[in-house]
Amino acid sequence: MKKSFFAVCFGLLLMVAMFSTVSAANVQVRISGWGGSDQPIIEEMLRLYVTPAMAKEGITVLYEPIADDFQRYIVNALSANTAPDLFYMDIFWAQSLIQAGQVEPLDNYIAKSKILKKEDFIPSLLDAFSYQGKVYGIPKDFNTLALFYNKDLFDLAGVAYPDENDTWDTLAKKLEAVSKLDGVYGLALQPEFARMGAFTYAAGFKTFDQNGKSNLFHPGFKAAFEWYTGLAKTRAGVMPADLGQSWGGGAFGTEEVAACIEGAWVIGHLKDQAPNLNYGTTFLPKDPSTGKRGNLIFCVAWGMNKDSKNKQAAFKVLEQLTSPEVQQWILERGLALPSRVALADNPYFKQNNREAQANYIVFRGASEGNVVPFSFGEYGGRWMDPINEALRAVMSGEMSVEEGLREAQYRLDQEMQR
Amino acid sequence: MRKQELSTIKLPSEEEIREFQLKQRRWRKVAMIYLVLLLVSILTIGPFFFGLLSSLKDNPLEWPPKLSVNQLKPANWIAAFRLSKAGCGKGFFGEFAPGAIIPFQVTYQVPAGKEPVTPQVVVPKRVPGTAGAALLIEHYAADYSRVSEVQEVKREILADGSVRVTYAFTIHHTGDVVCDRLPMDITVPLGQQFVSATLDPNRPNERLGRVQSWNNLTAGVIPYIFYNYHRVFSENYSRTTGKNLFSSWIKNSFVLCFARVLTNLLFASMAGFALARLKFRGKNTIFLLMLFSMMIPGQVTFISNYLVLRDGVFGLSKLFGVNTLLNSYSGLIVSGLVSASSVFIMKQFFEGLPESLEEAARIDGASSYQILFRIFFPLAKPALGALTILTFQGVWNEFFWPLVVLTSPQDRFTLTIGLLSFRRMYGVAFDWGPILAGSVISALPLVVLFVVFQRYFVEGISFTGVKG
């Protein structure tokens, strides 16, 4: 971008010749999210539902998918004052945007709205985007974790399928039994809090205690950590990296592991890479001592730009984006899991195919047991780093559980003191 | 006898021995240099070759990677041609059209003592996992096809007592709509081993070898071999404008490259000429400023450049009804009209031309413009050639700045940003084929450019170095 001064002058001259854009006359609402697989869905949804409805109101919707790191884009755009009127907020970093005062609270709008009511949305999702009693985002879709298992392998080994009554112990036994098969491991164990965390919450762990600190020596955390890493000691569990796979779904698709813990995103991968894989889905196992399940919620909401010039129009678009018809359509196409409570009884979920059933388990995951949003306040991903590191070290035998936890706690304390 | 023989052999003189050793040493050196060069070229071209090969495979992540690729076997080409011909009468680009009858054969092997079981053939209703492709499908072949009875046509007993059986069947199109693709699954009991088929399956070993599955029997030769490449073009179109995205991106990148090359050639030679040949006040200051601007890292000026573009070049373009230069090609072109380094190249070159040329022209009454465009320009071909190529390559690969300036709509992206959006689109489903294919396509123009114009590349590098 180095340019000499008179280049700019010439540029000006050139520009005069090049331009003929005229701005639109009616209200334009810009909405933005990440590109990729979300994008065709949003485009199609806008074409079918939102654009026709908004045309009556004299509102045009301009959709701007962002190809690169969306979080960075939205932070920059908000500070540069070029941000769209409505944008995605990932549960993972929404709080920092809200705390910075860049997101419009929606309570006043919701109070007047006929289409959008708080009680229509799954409470745990809406809570995740509430801050100091105000709602800042309307969840558009979400994911939780579920246990995916390969029916063929369990049949071959003569082991009962994992089911919703399983506890950690009974599941471990089943996994151990199925791993007796040649070339098959039990569970794909990603060394990540994004998977293991669900078990710590089942055991009663809280991310932050009353003093705002994280205690990794909490008995619940320790128990979950021990159980999860313990699986890696036998063939009952294996790190996908040890099989040359980058994630659990990859190892599951090639039938090297009998089960994996993933969200509904694994369905798309399996459709492409292993379309005939005979899999089933069930809830995560319960903690034997508390008798509860835990789960993580991965969720994305629409938020409104505090500096938007067309907030009323933007809210009208928001109503459409999360309307029952739109969510029904998204669900029926099997593309994502929408966030309205009423959808739980949807006929789509009752279909007799593995994908609809998997989606149902993931959908119900948001309201079973100790469900915690996948976010760590102001610390963001840095909160998980020491734990992920400890998981990897313990599973690969470099450290004992005790050492791993001590090291992680030490690094976490340092991080939180900063 | 012995003595005689010995006497006929002429012993080499000391000098000859020394010369021979010298030669030997020289050859050894040459061999070493060649070996090193070979290694370097393998290292550099290797990833590209590997990417190219992987982009053709059914499973690009295959580990350990194999060099035998189904898509590169002539037998499969012929089969794909015949199947597609049966599917719609065309062999190169196929579909599953009404009235089609697709013949197919498949061979299995069972160990000694076991009775072969007739395989089950199904045309599944298969939805691709990436949303773009999933939304595109209008008709499923599953709804319009009927599989004939599977018949045993050949049985062969091998030396170890195992049995090889070949089955044949046909798939009939029963409806009246054209389907894009005809997927197929064949299921056998566990232990019955797949040997071969009319066309090699895309996934030969699903469910521990029980299922062989094909993506599309009637794809045609080109989409069969270049499956991922075909997907790159066929699956990606903008739902708002209806344009094919990947072709738009290629076109955009080319347009941008040409515009930038043209402005760079023009302005760099004009500025270079002025700095090298004209005498005016502040010339040295301008040159110094220019050199200074080359030393500032791009990151320092990104934000100010962005703000300038956002407000339409200091707000001046608002006078002409342009609110912002973000999301526009004009913005990208304006911000890269000319680079200091190209001015530098041209200045150095013009300084090297003899002064008498210019003086002679002036005596004949030529103006500065005439001297530049009529006399210096034609002489500057090597420098201009080098500049063209360096600029083209630079703009083609430019990533960060277009990423910041162009955010929407998608069909305005350049190829580099388009590829990033690919990574998001297919990367989430760990579907690396189209990403690899897209990368290979994006690298091709530069590879061609390099092979054809490598001489200019070298010259360009020598120009940028210290000279005169």
Image (tube, rainbow, N blue to C red):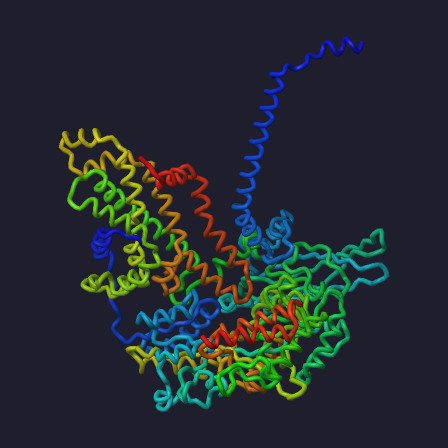
Between A216 and A225, the residue placed more toward the observer is A216
Residue A53 visible: no
- x, y percent for residue A53: 36, 79
- Depicted B334 relative to depicted A217: above or below: above
The answer to which of B110 and B412 lies nearer the viewer is B412
Give the image quarter of residue B384: top left
Q: Quadrant of the N terminus of chain A?
A: bottom left
Residue located 62% across and 76% down the image: A354
Quarter holding the C terminus of chain A? bottom left
Query: In the rendered image of this protein, does residue A189 appear above or below residue B66?
Result: below
Residue B86: x %, y % from top left: 60, 55
- Please tell me how many numbered marks the rendered image carries: 0
Q: Quadrant of residue A256?
A: bottom right
Left or right: where does residue B288 sit relative to residue A299? left
x and y, in percent, of residue B159 in the image:
85, 51
Q: Measured from the top left, where is residue A277 in percent x and y?
A: 65, 69
Placement of A371 over or under B297, stated as above or below = below
Left or right for B94, reference A71: right
Q: Residue A232 vs residue B130: left or right?
A: right
Residue B432 visible in the current orientation: yes
- B383 or B215: nearer the viewer: B383
Q: Nearer the viewer, residue B276 or B416?
A: B276
